[in-house]
Image (tube, rainbow, N blue to C red):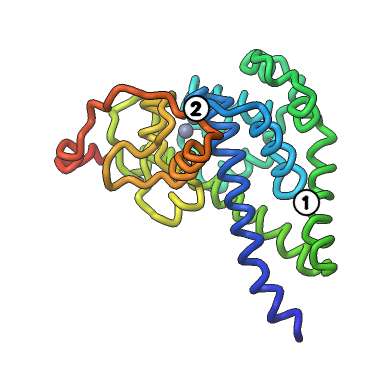
Amino acid sequence: MKDFIWIPLALVPAIMVAWFMLANYLSIVLHRCVAHRAVELPRWWIFTSTTLTNLFVLHINPRTWCADHRMHHAYSDTEKDPDKQPDVSYLQWLWGFFKHSPKASDPQIQRFTKDAIFKHPIFAFFSHPIAGPFCAVTAWLAPFAVTGSWIYATAVWIMIRITGMLVLSFQSYFAHGGDRGWGYRNYDIKDHSVNLTSRVALFLTAGEALQNNHHAKPSRASHAHLSHEWDPGFQLLRFLERVHVAQIPEKPPLAIVDSEAADGAHPY
Ligand SMILES: [Zn+2]
Ligand SMILES: [Zn+2]
């Protein structure tokens, strides 16, 4: 009976820690820094974040993720886009996601990730096919070691993966659902990217649900381009800048202004 009280309560801090670690590793380290070079981070931060997040929260292969993401920008919403092909239903997209399992040794993955950083032993280890199953075990062992409860460890493990699927659904599927009339667009670009308005989606994805802004200006560290748009990942990045971890390059002001958005923000 006691388990039914403390386990749900103790899931809250675990999910909060997981959010911070994944927002930092996925949105800031892998996405904004390594894949796009929109922000500068020291190597010690990149590799410490990579090691701790993969071992204790969720394994995300740094090399295949960055390669897939660069291909996603190069071929957005076409048949060659590894994240989302045109005219797919949500179930087709989910099926495609589970079927998609690229390896760091694939020639296409290597072609999109020639940067020297991918040869570093830490990136190489977490990009190896053995790292996925290995980290699935260590990520379960961590909450088990802290609490001694296999029920709690299993609940944390499952919750993180379910939340991860939700995050991916928001940023890869729904924030590319312009062809289905979802979200709004500030930029009339070639793909189906949109900015989602849901605060839940923006929080969970750490600002990555502002895909239309990001696809229009991929080298900008912030995905929020208008005053009402919210990018929690960039707020975390500003904090890292304040404590002298991150360096955010200055960019010229955007041509888009709030008054233009008030005229309809190009609903798609
Ligand atoms: Zn995208
Ligand atoms: Zn991107």
Quadrant housing residue 33: top right
Q: Position of residue 101 (x, y in %)?
A: 71, 33
Residue to which mark 2 is pinned: 39
* Residue 41 shown left or right of residue 186 in the figure: right
Residue under the point 75% across and 21% down: 120
* Residue 186 shown left or right of residue 48 in the figure: left
**Are discs 1 and 2 less than 8 Å apart at CB?**
no
Q: Is residue 229 visible?
A: yes
Give 188 or 10, whichever is nearer the viewer: 10
| Quarter occupied by the N terminus | bottom right
Q: Is mark 2 within 8 Å of ligand 2?
A: no
Q: Identify the amino acid type marked 2.
A: Val
User: Is disc 2 surrounded by few (<14), some (14 to 19) or many (20+) residues within 10 Å?
Assistant: many
| Quarter occupied by the C terminus | top left
Looking at the image, is mark 1 or mark 2 earlier in the sequence? Answer: 2
Distance from the alpha carbon under mark 1 to that under mark 2: 28 Å
Give 42 or 64, whichever is nearer the viewer: 42
Kindly report which numbered mark, 1 or 2, lies closer to the viewer in this rendering. Answer: 2
Q: Position of residue 107 (x, y in %)?
A: 71, 15
Q: Position of residue 256 (x, y in %)?
A: 23, 30
Q: Identify the amino acid type marked 1.
A: Ala
Q: Which mark is residue 139?
A: 1
Residue under the point 55% across and 32% down: 31
Q: Which mark is residue 71?
A: none
